[in-house]
Amino acid sequence: MTTTTPATITATTSKKAATGALTGLALGDALGFPTEFSSVPRILDTFGPWREMDLPKRAIVTDDTQMTLALGRGLRTAVERGRLGPKRMERPVREEFVEWNRSPENNRAPGRTCVTACGLLAAEDLAWQDASQIHSKGCGANMRVAPVGLVPGLTDEERAGAAQLQSALTHGHPTALAASDLTAHAVRLLAEGADPTALVGLLRSYALDNRDVYHQRWLGDLWTRSQDPDPVSFVRRGWDDCLAALERLRAAVGSVSPETDPCLATGEGWIAEEALATGLLCFLLFPDEPVTALRRAACTAGDSDSIACLAGAFAGAHLGAGAWPAEWAERIEYREELLALGALWDA
């Protein structure tokens, strides 16, 4: 069981890591929204030098932030009912995902995997494992998982299980599960004051420690929908993909120029392990310059909004609510709800 010392609690709450992470996630999402699907030369031609990119006047977010909020609401409901567990979490999160899918605000080019799975989740008599898209490892699960890393008081098993379950509701591929778990773990480590220079090593150790762990209590028989012979073989595939991505990240952190597209080193972010690695790379290139990290993440050839949303979550968890310019933070879409969840978890 995870223990949290008073010093860690003070460090996490005094900087308001949850508020910082959720605000940064939404800001990155809004900054990357107009640049997604564009090449870097086209972005530079349209928006000018990447280090001077400004937040759009209407700071509109994508499904990345919308689904983060849906997960956050579901987790809040689950925790209000008692100790977090798979049955207590699955129902409210499932309901929030279905509600998001049906909402008229779900008009921000959502991913096909999320829409398909959420449509199936609406059938109450269908086991969630049968709604899960077992062959999808798109980034749609780990771009929304930050709340799992921010909810206080969870054990290691609860946090890992919750991160993987929220992924599995839509993206059942083992790499999607592992990447979501690693993303939530990274957010938690940074919120608790981990040194960014040690982060890649800490994540690699975590991946190796969990390489053979199938969270049966949380995932049930999900693995049987795959072609793997057993649950351990199933999860190993995911962790091995993530370990390879972390190795590319490790090499990139010490060698790439911040002036080149990070996607060239760690991937374009359309799939889970690449979104994690490239979002982390943008943060680690500028660990004490959060706005610069967001601008670098938004000026990429890949899934720019998701990459920037992850970079913003990492930077905000590390530096806290004070990381973000007030003139940006005050006009982000869904600001009041983001602040309400942040205040709840910072408290």
Image (cartoon, rainbow, N blue to C red):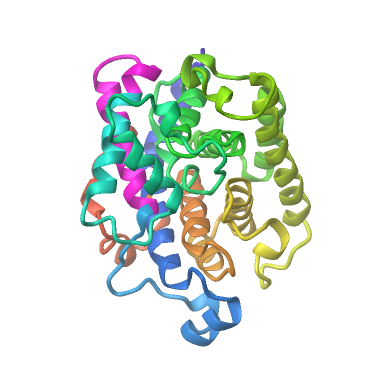
Quarter-of-image position of residue 109: bottom left
Side of 114 where 300 appears, left or right? right
Rendered-image quadrant of the C terminus: top left
Whole-percent x, y for residue 345 in the image: 33, 33
Observer-nearest of 102 and 159: 102
19 or 113, which lies in front? 113
Q: Which residues are magenta?
A: 64-89
Tell me what residue is drawn at x 53 percent, y 75 percent: 38
* Horizontal side of residue 26 vs 244, given as left or right: left
Image height of 297 relative to 25, above or below: below
Residue 161 in the image, given as x and y percentages of width and height: 49, 23
Residue 13 seen in the current view: yes
Count of numbered circles on the image: 0
Location of residue 215 with respect to 335 vertically, above or below:
above
Q: Is residue 72 magenta?
A: yes
Q: Nearer the viewer, residue 253 or 6?
A: 253
| Residue 212 visible, this orientation | no
Residue shown at the point (72%, 60%) measured from the top left: 265
Q: Position of residue 332 (x, y in %)?
A: 29, 61
What is the chief secondary structure element of the magenta stretch?
Answer: helix
> Residue 148 sits in which quadrant?
top left
- Above or below, 329 against 84 in this view is below
Identify which residue is drawn at 54% across, 63% down: 297
Q: Is residue 141 magenta?
A: no
Q: Is residue 217 left or right of residue 330?
A: right
**Residue 114: where, in percent of width, then height?**
41, 46
